[in-house]
């Protein structure tokens, strides 16, 4: 790598007229590599970028966008922190964010926490150094100590929460009507004759976990059914572990309805029901929060509360860019609530 810099050919040209092709030849790099470095592209390593910018300054080469970015101290990059991308909800939300960012001329860096709180703390600690201009985030919710977020907020880097958020962190947020959706889903199960409805949850501490469970509880009470804490089943992020938990639960509790707060728990429920020869939609009815595109293709087709994931991503990105462009005053936070759709299919509509 260093030899490339040493043997780079000398180009004889006027400092006032040098173009990007001549600059790339001086550096023994492609013009596309040089161009991506000026635009802050994430696939250019730090050392290469610094040498390109140093040579550009030496030769007095400053394309307009670079000069503007340097003057305004902008990276033209935003970060998106999400628990996972295997979940179809987050992949669609990221597509919505990226669409808006591309129109604005920004790049998107994606950070995956894998629901690991320590990773979230590390990412937040690293992202106040000017590498990104703002952050769109869906929280892990794995702890009550959010001091890392409060330290970050003191740096005045714009932040927007979507879907999962910390209630004690003041910032703009985009969410869906989780309480109303949970109430309607539970009410539907009750109307279909379910009386022992288990509620499957991964994390009760998350804001969405609290709202979804409250909707479930209130729907039971509205129908004259008592809430039973034993029917709230704590699950994990792993399929094998969840299948073990649910297999034991189905055997001991014999529920007639399942309300899964996240889609992975519905999938685990399907596996266990097939293992125990339980007829979904007849012996037991299943509904869940999910943006799973193959939900209609499952056997039987899965009833879902479908969140507008792509639109949430777009709205979160628009919120962030309004902050970056100074269209929202300091301390004025937006709160957007989008409506989810209750899509009923055979997993709850079968004749029992």
Image: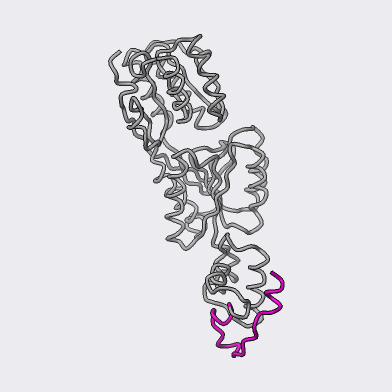
Front-most of 110 and 137? 110
Give the residue drawn at x 43%, y 49%.
95
Residue 24, image x and y in percent?
58, 77
Q: Quadrant of residue 205?
A: top right
Residue 75, image x and y in percent?
58, 63
Q: Quadrant of the C terminus?
A: top left
The reply to whether the magenta stretch includes residue 13 is yes
208 in relation to 82, above or below: above
Q: Report the coloring of the rendering.
A: one colour
Give the residue drawn at x 43%, y 48%.
315
Which residue occupies the extreme left position in the image?
A: 351
The reply to whether the magenta stretch includes residue 91 is no
64 in relation to 149, above or below: below
Please state the extent of the stretch shown in magenta in the rendering.
1-24
Residue 50, image x and y in percent?
66, 69
Q: Quadrant of the N terminus?
A: bottom right
Residue 56, image x and y in percent?
62, 78
Counting the numbered discs, the total is 0
Give the residue drawn at x 52%, y 76%.
64
Q: Quadrant of residue 34?
A: bottom right
Front-most of 156 and 310? 310
220 in relation to 25, above or below: above
């Amino acid at each position: 790598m260093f030899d490339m810099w040493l043997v780079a050919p000398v180009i004889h040209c006027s400092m006032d007229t040098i173009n990007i092709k001549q600059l790339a030849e001086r550096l023994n790099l492609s013009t596309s590599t040089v161009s991506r470095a000026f635009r802050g592209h994430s696939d250019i390593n730090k050392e290469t970028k610094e040498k390109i910018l140093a040579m550009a300054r030496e030769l007095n080469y400053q394309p307009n966008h670079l000069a503007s970015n340097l003057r305004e101290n902008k990276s033209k990059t935003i970060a998106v922190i999400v628990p996972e991308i295997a979940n179809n909800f987050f992949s669609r939300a990221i597509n919505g964010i990226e669409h808006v960012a591309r129109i604005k001329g920004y790049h998107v860096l994606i950070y995956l926490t894998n629901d690991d709180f320590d990773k979230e703390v590390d990412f937040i600690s690293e992202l106040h150094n000017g590498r990104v201009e703002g952050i769109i985030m869906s929280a892990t919710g794995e702890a009550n100590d959010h001091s890392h977020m409060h330290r970050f907020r003191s740096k005045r880097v714009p932040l927007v929460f979507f879907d999962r958020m910390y209630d004690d962190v003041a910032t703009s947020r985009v969410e869906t009507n989780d309480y109303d959706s949970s109430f309607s889903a539970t009410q539907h199960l009750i109307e279909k004759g379910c009386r022992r409805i288990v509620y499957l949850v991964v994390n009760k501490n998350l804001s969405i976990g609290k709202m979804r469970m409250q909707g479930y509880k209130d729907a039971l009470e509205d129908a004259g059914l008592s809430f039973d804490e034993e029917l709230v089943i704590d699950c994990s992020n792993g399929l094998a572990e969840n299948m073990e938990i649910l297999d034991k639960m189905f055997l001991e509790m014999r529920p007639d309805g399942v309300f899964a707060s996240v889609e992975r728990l519905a999938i685990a429920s399907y596996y266990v029901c097939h293992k125990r020869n339980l007829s979904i939609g007849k012996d037991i009815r299943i509904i869940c929060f999910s943006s799973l595109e193959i939900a209609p293709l499952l056997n039987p087709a899965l009833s879902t509360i479908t969140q507008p994931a792509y639109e949430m991503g777009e709205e979160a990105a628009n919120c962030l860019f309004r902050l970056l462009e100074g269209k929202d005053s300091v301390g004025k936070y937006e709160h957007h609530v989008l409506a989810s759709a209750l899509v009923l299919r055979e997993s709850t509509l079968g004749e029992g």
